[in-house]
Amino acid sequence: MDITSSELQQIITDSGESILDLSYDKPVMLVFLRHFGCIFCREAMKDIAGKRQQIEADGNAIVLVHMESNELAEDYFKKFMLEGVRHVHDPDCALYARFGLTKGSFGQLFGLRTMMRGFSTGISMKQLGGAPFGDAFQMPGIFVFHHGTLAATFIHEQVSDRPDYVKIFEHCRINDG
């Protein structure tokens, strides 16, 4: 996957900023979410909210990519304590595809490990999923850009993978000097 600067310039957040411009200000973690009915998407939002203060205090930005309407997304972000986070609306999953994020296979979406983690996550979060919004087969992923350059990636092998959002930045070796 080779994303060009001009492509990053065309990805505009809800606040009107391009990913390219943001990446020159600070490292940007572009998080491609699954649909909001997915327990792992909800877990990801909860995890990001729990680490948001640390991520932002370390001089990084979070941008969430979602398939839902901006209004619905903002309702969910508020519910998961992510109010005010920048986000990008991608209803046709064109950005997901451009970033190499595929549709999940049966095993990635419904394999034993995913089902077991989904059940335990649902119990711990007191919710066992919900109706899918957007594309229920879309796989998630994370990309960090700095100065217009891809600095780190996390591509989910299973929808149940649980990345450490802080450690993703630690692997970037970002140097402003």
Image (cartoon, grey):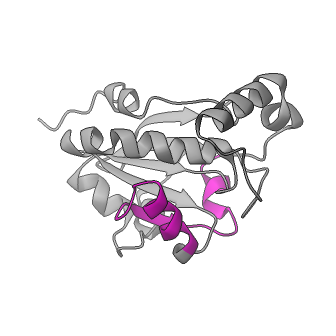
Q: x, y (%) of residue 100?
A: 65, 46
Q: Quadrant of residue 172?
A: top left
Tally of marks = 0
Tell me which residue sits at (69%, 55%) in the image: 37
Q: x, y (%) of residue 31?
A: 49, 48
Q: x, y (%) of residue 161?
A: 62, 29
Q: Nearer the viewer, residue 123 or 3?
A: 123
Q: Which residues are magenta?
A: 72-100
Q: Nearer the viewer, residue 6 or 126?
A: 126
- Which residue occupies the extreme left position in the image? 177
Tell me which residue sits at (53%, 74%) in the image: 70
**Does the rendering let one see residue 144?**
no
**Does the rendering let one see residue 23?**
yes
Tell me which residue sits at (84%, 38%) in the image: 105
Residue 95 falls inside the magenta stretch: yes
Residue 80 falls inside the magenta stretch: yes
Q: Is residue 144 found left or right of 135 in the rendered image?
A: left
Tell me which residue sits at (21%, 55%) in the image: 25
Q: Is residue 143 found left or right of 18 in the rendered image?
A: right
Q: Quadrant of the N terminus?
A: top right
> Is residue 168 depicted above or below 83 in this figure?
above
Q: Quadrant of the C terminus?
A: top left
> Is residue 146 depicted above or below 175 in this figure?
below
Q: x, y (%) of residue 125?
A: 59, 40
Q: Is residue 82 found left or right of 74 in the rendered image?
A: left
